[in-house]
Amino acid sequence: MKVAVLGGGVIGVSTAWWLRQSGHDVELVERRGGPAQETSFANGGQISVSYAEPWANPDAPLKILRWLMQDDAPLLFRPRLDARQWRWALAFLRECAPGRLAPNIRSMVRLAEYSRDTLRGMRDQLGIAYDHRERGILSFYRDQDEFDRSQRAAGLMRDFGVERRVLSADEVVAIEPALSAQRAHIVGGDFAPDDESGDVHLFACALARHAEQAGVVFRYNTQVTRLTSEQGRVTGLEIVRPDGGFDTLRADAYVVALASHTPHLVEPLGVPCNVYPTKGYSATFVVRDDSRAPTVSLTDRAHKVVMSRLGPRLRLAGTAEIGGYDRDLSPARCHMLARLADELFPGALDIEGATYWAGLRPSTPSNVPLIGRTRLANLYLNTGHGTLGWTMGAGSGRALADLIDGRRPEPDFPFLGQ
């Protein structure tokens, strides 16, 4: 069977790889000049099964209201005259109901666990190097009330069989001595020893090379314009070639993995896709003094910022703006990341030489991604992973390949069309 995969981020490349492993002829279409040039380019680097928690929770609405006028708030809602944004926001509020938290976490954890295991197998099989570290993820808290509230989610994780240890402030510093200067400001933490970190861009580019060697055809610098359909099936994909000419790509099945832009392509066909961009930022610093820089992947829960050591670099990433599709850098956001890096690890990093980036995370209101078959028999979605595209990417591609082949995927997850 010939399958067209739309989108060259870690989700699309993983999907193409696993479809090719199943014996299909695969063409991947990507508007950029190479893989992982947008959302998968410079994220926080964490593979965080143990922190697969939705933003939508009973405490979220009041926090968002409190942060409305704060330009560097961790989660900022910027109202727009955009029906998609308001539809997403209303659904987000529904997902904040107390009864939704546990089932959403359960779905996210099951897919994330499966994906982490899949990633490890691919790493061993293909020998891909991506500055990965298997030293766990350590979260630290500065506020006692927030620390106490966080244990509800940690308890749910443990109920689902995920190890997430509660720590004292002294235990936090023992695991990551680079935080010792901040000991007076830390009230506690939790630690997930099975989690990992690594550079998603390096991984996706290496996997794309393996996929190409295996026979996947990559069409870079190719713009998707629309899907055509007839009698409940997609009949073709209209594209703009690199030379500016128009063409129609025909396949037996189509997978849309276009991140935040997926709704623009599938909703005209009557396929619901409540995915909206949440803009995130990262800052990458060269490590100057290794003795003062962290080696464990960290999360500062007060600022909602993650930190991952990627070889000779340290990346800080976080914040979320729900305000449209622009990727312009906010000076306030960039300054916050630089200030935090300098505060936490004084003298360790080249602060002035930081590289800043912003990307659009494709988020569903529940943070549970949309994976599976749509109302059109040969059209599939693989999108809506939010902050967990790297955590869930390898497994999402493998699970969707199983669905396309008529096999039941391994993880217990609410796949579309089942």
Image (spheres, rainbow, N blue to C red):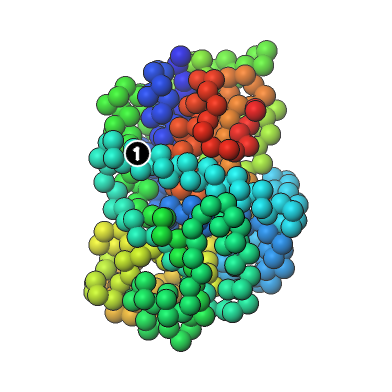
The residue at the point 28 percent across, 53 percent down is 131
The residue at the point 54 percent across, 20 percent down is 406
Q: Judge left or right: residue 30 versus residue 285.
A: right
Q: Identify residue type, mark 1.
A: Gly
Residue ID for mark 1: 121
Q: Judge left or right: residue 81 versus residue 317.
A: right
Q: Nearer the viewer, residue 7 or 194?
A: 194
Q: Position of residue 268 (x, y in %)?
A: 67, 29
Residue 16 location, quadrant: top left
Residue 60 location, quadrant: bottom right
| SS for dot 1 | helix
Rendered view: 148 above or below 1: below
Query: Visible in this render: residue 360?
Result: no
Rendered view: 298 above or below 412: below
The residue at the point 46 percent across, 38 percent down is 395
Q: Judge left or right: residue 178 versus residue 326.
A: left
Q: Position of residue 348 (x, y in %)?
A: 29, 75
Residue 229 location, quadrant: top right
Q: Nearer the viewer, residue 209 or 144?
A: 144
Across the whole image, how many numbered discs are drawn on residues?
Answer: 1
Q: Position of residue 212 (x, y in %)?
A: 30, 27
Quarter of the image for the C terminus: give it. Answer: top right
Query: Visible in this render: residue 200?
Result: yes
Q: Judge left or right: residue 50 versus residue 22.
A: right
